[in-house]
Amino acid sequence: MNQERLMKIIQGPVVSEKSNNLSESRGQIALKVLPDANKKEIKAAVELLFGVQVESVTTTLQKGKTKRFGRYVGRRSNVKKAYISLVPGQNLDLEAAAKTAE
């Protein structure tokens, strides 16, 4: 896999109540990824960027909502999410990873 592509796959963390509950109860991390990324690429990207071992990857595609802006009808873009399960004993701190990236 191309290392340059792997660096672009992860777009950011999903910050929501559901993702916080998942990280506390199951130890899973929710990330926004490129829509055309597959599970093998996502696993390789997480292992490369954060230096942790990934046990499994589950993906979902969230369809964009149709919204009205005054008299105009628009549509939000689709978002692909990846739920990452780490090997027991591994820990991923997104805040620390963001500080080292700066």
Image: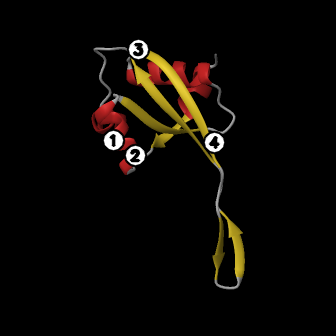
Q: Are marks 1 and 2 in contact (CB under 8 Å)?
A: yes
Q: CA distance from mark 1 to mark 2?
A: 5 Å
Q: Residues within 10 Å of mark 1 (few under 14, many from 20)?
A: few
Residue at image position (45%, 37%) is 30
Kindly state the secondary structure of the residue where label 3 is placed: loop
Q: Residue 19, relative to residue 2: is it above or below? A: below
Of the numbered discs 4 and 2, the one sitting upstream in the chain is: 2
Q: Residue 15, relative to residue 35: is it above or below? A: below
Kindly state the secondary structure of the residue where label 2 is placed: helix
Q: Which mark is residue 18?
A: 2
Residue at image position (43%, 23%) is 85
Which residue in the protein does label 1 denote?
21
Q: Residues within 10 Å of mark 4 (few under 14, many from 20)?
A: few
Please state which amino acid type lies under the numbered disc 2: Lys
Q: Are marks 3 and 4 in contact (CB under 8 Å)?
A: no
Counting from the top left corner in percent of width and height, residue 12 is at: 47, 42
Q: Residues within 10 Å of mark 2 (few under 14, many from 20)?
A: few
Nearer the observer, disc 3 or disc 2?
A: 2
Which residue in the protein does label 3 denote?
53
Which residue in the protein does label 4 denote?
61
Nearer the observer, disc 4 or disc 1?
A: 1
Counting from the top left corner in percent of width and height, residue 58 is at: 55, 28
Nearer the observer, disc 4 or disc 2?
A: 2
Q: Quadrant of the C terminus?
A: top left
Nearer the observer, disc 3 or disc 4?
A: 4
